[in-house]
Amino acid sequence: DAMVIQNPRYQVTQFGKPVTLSCSQTLNHNVMYWYQQKSSQAPKLLFHYYDKDFNNEADTPDNFQSRRPNTSFCFLDIRSPGLGDAAMYLCATSTGGSYNEQFFGPGTRLTVL
Amino acid sequence: AQTVTQSQPEMSVQEAETVTLSCTYDTSESDYYLFWYKQPPSRQMILVIRQEAYKQQNATENRFSVNFQKAAKSFSLKISDSQLGDAAMYFCALTHNNDMRFGAGTRLTVKP
């Protein structure tokens, strides 16, 4: 089945130790998104790629970076995780255009010790 | 700036009954789309229903329907004949130019 896959599902890191979260898709969608969702809160858009064009949200901390080496893969790098970065990180894809739904992965839950 | 507000953190409904989840939004854009997403416990978020802002007719998908009041910037979700599998977090969302903003969510409990 075509889908959005996130690895790992659970990630534990230490304060200040860089971590990379992975997202892949078999839907061949143009747009890939990263969201941060803290407990009982709305998902918050961090950035998205439309093909190779990177779009950063104005309030996304510099600590968060992203890479999209090809259509299928997108990575979220957290350079120096703080305790406040502990959250669920959701990856989503769409074909682009506001009408089109976003397809979400299961998320990676990040714990920072 | 686009904002989405869900004023009901939690709702409950008896199985087979009807429940309405509220959502209001604010945007200065004329072309936007509204969505309801469902996030079951420990499972991924999926689309429930969507509405084009330029369409006056309310969207329906089986047991799910919306009441879209554009002038009031209101977009409520009605779930008829509630089932146990409807228990989840429900997020209202607004999209303009690939930028999706979510409300804080409403946790729906379905009582057998």
Image (cartoon, coloured by chain):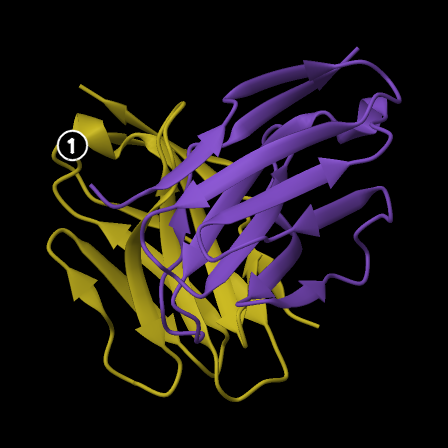
Chain colours: A purple, B yellow
Q: Residue A29 at x, y = what percent? A: 39, 61
- Above/below status of A2 relative to B40: below
- Above/below status of A72 relative to B45: below
Image quarter (top left, top right, bottom left or bottom right) of the N terminus of chain A: top left
Left or right, A33 with reference to B63? right
Near mark 1 (Cα within 10 A), the count class, few <14, some 14-19 or many ≥20, is: some
Q: Residue A13 at x, y = what percent? A: 74, 15
Residue designated by label 1: B83
Image quarter (top left, top right, bottom left or bottom right) of the C terminus of chain A: top right
Q: Residue B29 at x, y = what percent? A: 58, 85
Q: Residue furthest top?
A: A113
Asked whether residue B23 is in view, the answer is: no
Asked whether residue B54 is in view, the answer is: yes
Residue at x 72%, y 38% (from the top left corner)? A77
Residue at x 35%, y 59% (from the top left corner)? A28
**Looking at the image, which is closer to me, B39 or B56?**
B39
Residue at x 38%, y 67% (from the top left corner)? A95
**Looking at the image, which is closer to me, A45 or A4?**
A4
Mark 1 element type: loop
Query: Which chain letter matches label 1?
Result: B
The quadrant in which residue B61 appears is: bottom left
Q: Please tell me how many numbered marks the rendered image carries.
A: 1
Task: Check disc 1 and give the amino acid type.
Answer: Gln
Q: Residue B81 at x, y = what percent? A: 12, 41
**Looking at the image, which is closer to me, A27 or A107?**
A27
Left or right, B19 with reference to A33? left
Q: Residue furthest front?
A: A69
- Above/below status of B101 relative to B104: below
